[in-house]
Each structure stands twice: as C-alpha cells, then as structure tokens.
Amino acid sequence: MVSIPQVTLNDGTWFPQLGLGTYNLRGEEGIEAMVAAIEGGYRLLDSAVNYENEVEVGEAVRRSGLDRDELLVTTKVPGRHHGRDEVAASAAESLERLGLDRIDLYLIHWPNPRVDRYVETFRGMLDLQERGLVRSVGVSNFTIPMLERVAAETGVTPAVNQVELHPYFPQTQLREFHEAHGIRTESWSPLARRSELLSEPLVQDLAEAYRVTPTQVVLRWHVQGGSTPIPKSADPDRQRENADVFGFELDADAVSALTGLERGRLWDGDPDTHEEF
C-alpha cells in the first residue's frame, strides 16, 4: 500500500496530495475499482452529481471498512442547482445517494457566469458547512476574478479550486494566485487524457532518467507544483503506479522543461463561457 502525504487546507482540515478521479466509474465494477484504490492507499474520492456515481462512491466507502474520518469524499453541485436554496436541496440529494452524513469537500462544478448565481451558491454551501453537512467548501473551474469576487462578497476564500491542469496547460498565473491566497490547487485531467503528452520525447527521456514511468513523471510534476492531481483508473496496478510518486523528486530543470510544453487548454472548458447544467 502506498502512503499518500497530506496537506492542510485553509480551513484547517486535511487533504491528500493525490486522489482518485471517479468519472465513469459506475456499477459493480466501479465500486470494486474504488475499493481497490482505497486498499492501495487512496484516501480521496472525487465525484460529482453529473458523474452519476454518488451511489457507487458511498458504497465503496462502506465496503472499504475504514473509519469514515479516514476518507475524504468530494462531490460537486451542478449548474442547474445554483442558488442558495437550490444548493441546500442538491446537497441533501447527494447525501442521500452517497448514504453518508456529510460531504467532505463540496465544490461548485462550473461557475456558469452568464447565469451569475455562483456567489449565492457559495453562500448556500457555507450555510451547509455551518450545519455540519459539509466539511470544506471550494470551487471548480474558477478564474482569478471569480475567486476574488467570491472572497470579497462572502468573506470566505474557497479551500480548493479544481481546474484543468497538466504540462500542456500549466496555469502558472492561477497557481501562483492560489499559493498567495491559501487555495489548494486540484488538477482534473492531470495526464491530459486523449493527448500525446505521455509519449512526448521529453517525458519519455525523463522517465528513463529517473527510472519511473511517463505517468509518474507527469504526476510528480503536479505534486511538486503544489497541486493535488486526481488521475482516474479502474486498474489496481495502474492505481498503485499513479500513487507511487512520493519516492523521487524532479530537479528544477525537469520541472521547468515540462512546464515549457505549454500549448493551452485541451478541452472546451473556458470558465468565462462554458456552461454546465
């Protein structure tokens, strides 16, 4: 079993430096994959209402046999549930599907700025936190101006911002803002899925030099950059490989070279225009 280190969020709670993405992990096979990950050392399961697998995530938590406080479950409020009252109802539905008495990290999945209800949604999430139904409150796919607005209008800085992040889209300015304001960066699509990132000559050369796999090179880049990547895998061997990135360190030149692969956002997900419901 791999031991995954933890950091402390700005609200004083713990958070792993690497977690499991659960997108498309559904049904009995999905549950078994998540249980295998927990047995392999994972302590963070990342879900969302729109992943349609909260039932499976909750069942994996129960089957793991671990004390509830040893696991961190994330879910996300969809755009169709934005609003102070709406998010309260959405959280209740998520908790029922999960079969749990709290959500450890609750995120706004997308800001949907045209609708312009993300600030009141965040206020509603803070209400849930006060009631003990949510442990930590954060956001996903937020820009710097959006983060500044939420903090200014609610008086609370999000604990986490989960964003597309990988060497092709390193988001350097955003990560620097997170660091300066105590926001934990979390990386979705950390391996730039369906791209040629892992076959890049640079990544291949670094894997050979450090005697690790290309996947481990990229995930180590995330960790050293102060981000929590959440790679998804249903294969126990691949899960262990993904988590085994805490026994080596890339030198500064390697980190800089990987960041230099920047080419921009890979997915149709510009937070200023993208809408998710």
Image (cartoon, grey):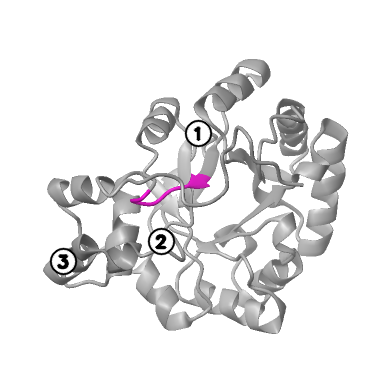
Q: Amino acid at mark 1?
A: Asn
Answer with the quarter of the image where residue 129 lies: top right
Query: How far apart are the alpha carbons under marks 3 and 2?
Result: 17 Å
Could you tell me what secondary structure mostly forms the magenta stretch? loop
Nearest the camera: 79 or 108?
A: 79
- N-terminal label among 3 and 2: 2
Q: Amino acid at mark 3?
A: Asp
Marks 3 and 2: CB-CB under 8 Å?
A: no
Nearest the camera: 37 or 23?
A: 23
Query: How far apart are the alpha carbons under marks 3 and 1?
Result: 37 Å
User: According to the image, label 1 marks what residue?
Assistant: 10
- Badge 2, how many Cα within 10 Å: few under 14, some, many 20+? many
Q: Residue at x 79, y 55 (%)?
A: 94
Q: Quadrant of the N terminus?
A: bottom left
- Measured from the top left, where is residue 28 in percent x and y? 70, 83
Q: Which mark is residue 191?
A: 2
